[in-house]
Amino acid sequence: ELQQLARQLGAKAQRGAAPAELLLPAYALVKEACIRQLGLEAYDVQLLAAIALHHNKLVEMQTGEGKTLAAVFPAFLNALSGKGVHILTFNDYLARRDAAWMGPVYKFLGLRVGYIQEGMALEEKRLAYHCDITYATAKEVGFDYLRSFIAYDEQELVLRPFHYAIVD
């Protein structure tokens, strides 16, 4: 039933519904998916951070306060459009860890999640970047963006157009 609701929200988003009108049902779905898939319940401070992130506000949270979980809410909401979301982490380890840790929530809600690592083959990167949610370092995304300007042919391009990003 929750997956059906997620598909309905995605259809609304792809028909042009404003993310603001989808925020409450989308966040409710993510909250329940986190409980079912991870056994984690988002605290009020994480939900407030998630709302602020969606509204393009800067949010400061200390280590251990749940930034990784808070980011899932606006990532899901903004991925409903089908245009992709980038979550930028400090290092490759965190990109890999967070994609694996939060992946079950995204997958439960019908989204594909991937991650980028330094030294990945072009095809692996292309597949990861074309997921609904892509975890990567700002450095890798930045260099892949710059590489797109010196690419000789389309086969060397890995990025999809930028839509929404969260910097952790």
Image (tube, helix red, strand yellow):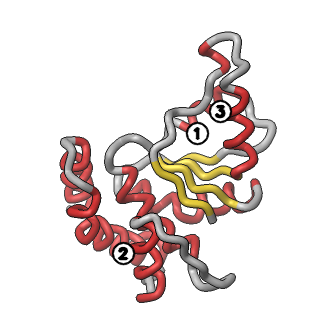
- Say which residue appears at 25% left-offset and 71% top-offset: 24
- Say which residue appears at 68% left-offset and 55% top-offset: 96
Say what amino acid the circle numbered 1 marks.
Ala
> Between marks 3 and 2, how big is the CA–CA gap?
30 Å
How would you rate the neighbour count of disc 1 (Cα within 10 Å): few for under 14, some for 14-19, many for 20 or more? many
Task: Decide if residue 146 is on the left or right side of residue 164.
Answer: right
Say what amino acid the circle numbered 3 marks.
Glu
Residues at discs 1 and 3 in contact (Cβ within 8 Å): yes
> Between marks 2 and 1, how big is the CA–CA gap?
25 Å
Residue under numbered circle 3 = 124
- Say which residue appears at 65% left-offset and 32% top-offset: 124
Residue 155: x, y in percent? 63, 16
Which image quarter holds the N terminus? bottom left
How would you rate the neighbour count of disc 3 (Cα within 10 Å): few for under 14, some for 14-19, many for 20 or more? some
Residue 84: x, y in percent? 45, 44
Q: Residue furthest front?
A: 57
Q: 85 above or below 20? A: above
Residue under numbered circle 1 = 128
Of pointers 2 and 1, the one earlier in the residue sequence? 2
Of pointers 3 and 2, the one earlier in the residue sequence? 2
